[in-house]
C-alpha cells in the first residue's frame, strides 16, 4: 500500500491549482480570439493581458467627503468621475479542487438611459483569472485580460460563449490616482427588474456604505513583490477611514 506524506499532498494540490489556472487563462485567450473577428454584429479589438494587484475596503457614506479630502492630499491633482453599468459572468473550468469560478468575465459600459446613445453598444470586456495562491503576499494578485467589444446584442453574444450572468449593477463614483496606483470609490446600485434602469435603483449595501478599491497593474511576467508591498503601504494611509483588505472573494 502506497502512503503519501502531507507534504506530497500539499504539493499535488498546489500543482493542480496552478494547472487549473493555466487552463482558465488559455480558455480566455481562445474566447478573445473568437471575438477578435469583425462582422456586422460584434466587433472585437486587440486585447491586453497583465497582472492586477488589488485591495478592497468599505466606507460609510457619511464619511465620503472626509475621505475625498484625504485623497486630495494623498493623490495626484484632480479626479475622474464615472457613471457605468456592469454585468458580471462566470465560467467554471476547474475540477472539484478549484477555488470557485476559475474565470470571471465582466462587461462594463457608460450608463445611458438612451439606448441609441453613440456609446451604448461599446463595452469594456475584462477576463479575471483566479488569484495567485500565495498566502504571504499582502495584496490580491490576479491575471487580467482587457478588451473592447462593440455589440448590438451583448446578451446573446455572451450566451454564445457559454457564460452565465451572476449579477448586474450601476456604479457611480470617482477615480483618483497616485502615480501608477488607482483609488476607485464606488456607489453601487441594483435594479428590481433586470434591464430596467430608469427608476427604482436601490443601494446594494444596506449599511449605506461605498466600495473602495486600491489597485495597480504590471506586465504579466513582472516580479510583483516590491510593488505589492508599496501598494499595501499606500493603502494603509487611508486608515482609519477605510481598512483595505485582501479579501478571499473567490471562496464560497
Image (spheres, rainbow, N blue to C red):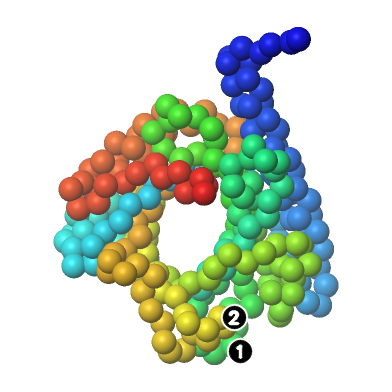
Q: Along the line of sight, which residue is nearer the eye, 235 or 199?
A: 199
Local packing at callout 2 (Cα closer than 10 Å; few below 14, some 14-19, many 20+) is some
Find residue 166 and report its image quarter.
bottom right
Are the residues flagged by discs 1 and 2 in contact, CB closer than 8 Å? yes
Q: Is residue 135 above or below residue 35?
A: above
Image quarter for residue 123?
bottom right
- Does 234 appear above or below 147? above
Foreground pick, 251 / 81: 251
User: Residue 191: x, y in percent?
Assistant: 47, 80
* The N terminus - image quarter: top right
- Left or right: residue 237 versus residue 125 is left
Of the numbered discs in the image, which one, if any, rests on residue 116? 1
65 relative to 100, above or below: below
Q: Check the image and report above or below for 52 versus 228.
A: below
Per the rendering, the mark at residue 120 is: 2
Residue found at the very far front of the displayed protein: 1
SS for tag 2? loop
In the rendering, at what x and y percent does residue 244 appear? Answer: 31, 46
Residue at x-position 78% and y-position 77%:
41
- Residue 252: give x, y in percent of width and height: 52, 49
Q: Residue at x 70, y 41 (%)?
A: 95
The dot on residue 132 is none
Query: In which image quadrant can residue 116 be found?
Result: bottom right
Crowd tier of the residue under label 1, counting other residues whose Cα lies within 10 Å: few below 14, some 14–19, many 20 or above: few
Amino acid at each position: 500500500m502506497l502512503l503519501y506524506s502531507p507534504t506530497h499532498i500539499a504539493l499535488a494540490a498546489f500543482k493542480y491549482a496552478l494547472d487549473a489556472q493555466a487552463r482558465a487563462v488559455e480558455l480566455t485567450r481562445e474566447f478573445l480570439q473568437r471575438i477578435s473577428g469583425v462582422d456586422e454584429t460584434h466587433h472585437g479589438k486587440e486585447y491586453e493581458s497583465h497582472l492586477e494587484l488589488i485591495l478592497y475596503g468599505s466606507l460609510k457614506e457619511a464619511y465620503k467627503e472626509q475621505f475625498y479630502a484625504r485623497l486630495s492630499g494623498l493623490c495626484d491633482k484632480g479626479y475622474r468621475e464615472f457613471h457605468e453599468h456592469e454585468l458580471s459572468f462566470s465560467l467554471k473550468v476547474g475540477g472539484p479542487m478549484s477555488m470557485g469560478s476559475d474565470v470571471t468575465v465582466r462587461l462594463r459600459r457608460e450608463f445611458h438611459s438612451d439606448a441609441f446613445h453613440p456609446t451604448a453598444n461599446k463595452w469594456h470586456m475584462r477576463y479575471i483569472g483566479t488569484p495567485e495562491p500565495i498566502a504571504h503576499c499582502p495584496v490580491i494578485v490576479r491575471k487580467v485580460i482587457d478588451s473592447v467589444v462593440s455589440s448590438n446584442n451583448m446578451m446573446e453574444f455572451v450566451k454564445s460563449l457559454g457564460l452565465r450572468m451572476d449579477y448586474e449593477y450601476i456604479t457611480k463614483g470617482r477615480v483618483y490616482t497616485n502615480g501608477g496606483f488607482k483609488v476607485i470609490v464606488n456607489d453601487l446600485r441594483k435594479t428590481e427588474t433586470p434591464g430596467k434602469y430608469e427608476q427604482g435603483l436601490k443601494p446594494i449595501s444596506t449599511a449605506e456604505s461605498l466600495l473602495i478599491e486600491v489597485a495597480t497593474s504590471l506586465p504579466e511576467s513582472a516580479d510583483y513583490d516590491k510593488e505589492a508591498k508599496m501598494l499595501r503601504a499606500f493603502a494603509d494611509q487611508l486608515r482609519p477611514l477605510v481598512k483595505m483588505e485582501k479579501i478571499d472573494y473567490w471562496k464560497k
